[in-house]
Each structure stands twice: as C-alpha cells, then as structure tokens.
Amino acid sequence: MPKEQGQKVIARNKKARHEYEIEATYEAGISLTGTEVKSLRAGRASLVDGYAVIKDAEVWLQGVHIAEYAEGTWTNHSPRRNRKLLLHRAEINKLIGKTKETGLTLIPLELYFKDGKVKVEIGLARGKKTYDKRQTLMERQNKREAERAMAAAFKRNNRRK
C-alpha cells in the first residue's frame, strides 16, 4: 500500500480568525485512538468550541468534537474527550511563558492529515474587541468592493478591443 503524501484538510475553525487576533501558529501532532482516526478520514470533526490548555507541562486539546465512528463497537471513543498534543519541549516552554501573559490563549485553527499523520495547527491568540471585529469586517468588505470594481473595469476595457 503506497504511503499518503501531501496535506488534506479535515476541519477549519473559520470563526477563530474572526474572534481572535492570531499572533503565532504552531503545528502539533495529536494523540488519537483508532476509531478517531477512522472518523477523521470520513471528515467528521468540528473545531468550533475547541481550545488548548497547558497542564503539568503538557498541552491538551479540549472541546474538539470528533464524531463517533459509525462502524465502531464497544471500543468507540468519546466525541469530546481531551486529547494530548505532541509538541517539542522548547515549544511547550515557550507557550507556557506566552499564555501566562494576560489575554493570550491557544485556539485550534485547522485539523489536517499531513503525510498520513493527523496534525493540528494551534494559534496563540488574543481576543478581539467588538470594534476590532467591525473594523476587520469593514476592511474585508472594502477590499471585496475594490476587487469587483477592478474586475468590472477590466471587462469594459476588454470589450472595447
């Protein structure tokens, strides 16, 4: 059987980029059971309520929902169990120092397969204020309108030729 190559996204946390300002991102392995991997291969995961905490110099992913495997038996997993993240000791020490700062938290941004292994991208994030969210939405809307105007002008110029 050939080895998997490349990256296949399982789930993205779109809400996180709206709710938080991402300061740094880290790629971590994740400790899973067999039925969890099978469920992920079917694309059944949600990162919406997820977050990571540091306990006893280990990073744990909490609140992430990986649906039960349909063909699983009594060995099936609990959908919202805590899962250990696999990071280098230096990265964990850096995260411990950063999360002690007020307002910083660890949020899962993306869950994906990379060369056959499940990885999670976690972001060191600071919560946005309401006015920051409005500002971001306004900038995105202005950018979209500018792109539409440029596309319309491009179409008009091409019709004349």
Image (cartoon, helix red, strand yellow):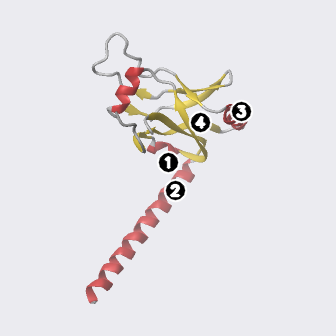
Instruction: Inspect this view and state whether residue 42 appears.
Output: yes
Task: Name the front one of labels 4 and 1.
Answer: 4
Q: Residues within 10 Å of mark 4 (few under 14, many from 20)?
A: many
| Residue extending farthest bottom | 161
Check disc 2 and report its element: helix, strand or loop. helix
Check disc 3 and report its element: helix, strand or loop. helix
Residue that numbered label 4 is attached to: 106
Residue that numbered label 3 is attached to: 93
* C-alpha distance separating marks 1 and 2: 8 Å
Check disc 4 and report its element: helix, strand or loop. strand
The disc at residue 18 is 1
* C-alpha distance separating marks 3 and 1: 27 Å
| Callout 3 touching callout 2 (CB < 8 Å) | no
Marked residue nearer the N-terminal end (4 or 2):
4
Disc 4 marks a residue whose amino acid type is: Leu
Residue 136 at what x, y percent from top left? 52, 56
Residue that numbered label 2 is attached to: 136
Instruction: Inspect this view and state whether residue 44 appears.
Output: no
| Residue extending farthest top | 74
Disc 3 marks a residue whose amino acid type is: Asn
Q: Residues within 10 Å of mark 3 (few under 14, many from 20)?
A: some
Marked residue nearer the N-terminal end (3 or 2):
3
Residue 36 at what x, y percent from top left? 40, 24
Residue positioned 49% across, 36% down in the render: 119
Give the left or right position of residue 32, taking residue 70 as reference.
Answer: right
| Callout 4 touching callout 2 (CB < 8 Å) | no
Residue positioned 45% across, 39% down in the render: 115
* C-alpha distance separating marks 3 and 4: 14 Å
Q: Quadrant of residue 44?
A: top left
Marked residue nearer the N-terminal end (3 or 1):
1
Disc 1 marks a residue whose amino acid type is: His
